[in-house]
Amino acid sequence: MKPRIVTLTLNPALDVATSVERVQPVHKLRCAEPRFDPGGGGINVARVVRRLGGDVLAVFPAAGATGARLAALVEAEGVPAAPSPAAGETRESFNVIDRTDGAEYRFVLPGPALAPAELEACVSAALAASSPGGVLVVSGSLPAGVPPSLIADLAGRARAAGLRLAVDTSGPALASALQAGVFLVKPNLKELSDHLGRALPDTAARLQASRDLIAAGAAEVIALTLSAEGALLVTRDSAWSVPAAPVQPVSTVGAGDSFLAGLIFGLAHGRPPQEALRTAAAAGAAALLAPGTALGEAEDVFSLAEQIRPAAVP
């Protein structure tokens, strides 16, 4: 039986997290024992969906020894996966905490370019693994050399296969998704403002912008994350908001991916938008409680969800 949710991560990463006494130039910085996690937008979504009990498959290119380690870490978490061989070396991302002031530093390396055949192998695998009516999630940056128009092409292929395409990306790739029309997009406030070319200073402006895009056929659902202000979820028939959960962040890594995972988990299982938003906000908050590149645990998500009350926005 095919999974209800398939994630496609075209530029995955091996995430490395550590800490130092203090970040400063010139001197050698002695790091604490590192933590290694599988990373990249869609992989993180799949990890959280799996923890919540969802049926999911993660599709991604795996290049070189780093790609093999990445695939092994995904497997070790019990996440069903379909890694696709690729040339080069999967990238690494570094997360460093300054123990003196708690500041977090994130260093993101470029990933390998994908040959056309490697790219098509990943896309075809994701489409073939998806079931009609299911959700295909494309999340994260595109590899070097992959045109943003790939998202529009994928939207057409997903639509033809009866799939609901959810997209979490930015810049020209986000524009490509909105031009083609997709099931769901999850921009943050800056990404949506940049796309529209204007500021969205308040709820009224954000709601109107989202409703205009939905009316134009750009998306059926828009989930707008607002950092410390929480999030706004807009559909054709309703709009809901949640404030940011009252948690003290340990690390911000994976919070947006976790939010998307909770949202997709809820919608894919037929839950109403406000309940899906509740799970999304709880999953994002749970990620903030996890150290380094770790993600939130299911028990934290369910506990936080009890404290979150989405409010209807007129």
Image: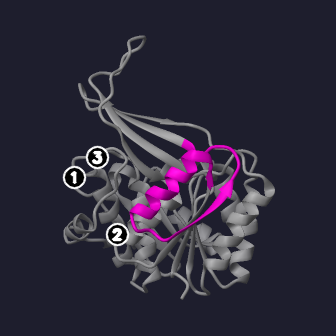
Q: Residue at x 31, y 32 (%)?
A: 19
Q: Mark 1 points at which residue?
A: 247
Residue 268 to residue 205: above or below: below
The magenta stretch spans which residues?
62-91
Q: Mark 2 = which residue?
A: 51
Where is residue 205 drawn, in percent x and y?
Answer: 49, 58
Look at the image and tell me in which quarter the N terminus lies.
Answer: bottom right
The reply to whether the magenta stretch includes residue 226 is no
Estimate the x, y position of residue 254 in percent, counting from the top left: 41, 53
Question: Is residue 298 or residue 229 the one in the foreground?
Answer: 298
- Of callouts 2 and 3, which one flags the residue occurring earlier in the amino acid sequence? 2
Q: Can residue 284 be seen in this view?
A: yes
- Horizontal placement of 180 versus 263: left or right? right
Name the residue type under label 1.
Val
SS for tag 3?
A: loop
Q: Whole-percent x and y of residue 187? A: 52, 57
Whether 289 is drawn above or below 235: the answer is above
Kind of residue at disc 3: Pro
The residue labelled by disc 3 is: 291
Is residue 83 rendered to the left or right of residue 123?
A: left
Q: Quadrant of the C terminus?
A: bottom left
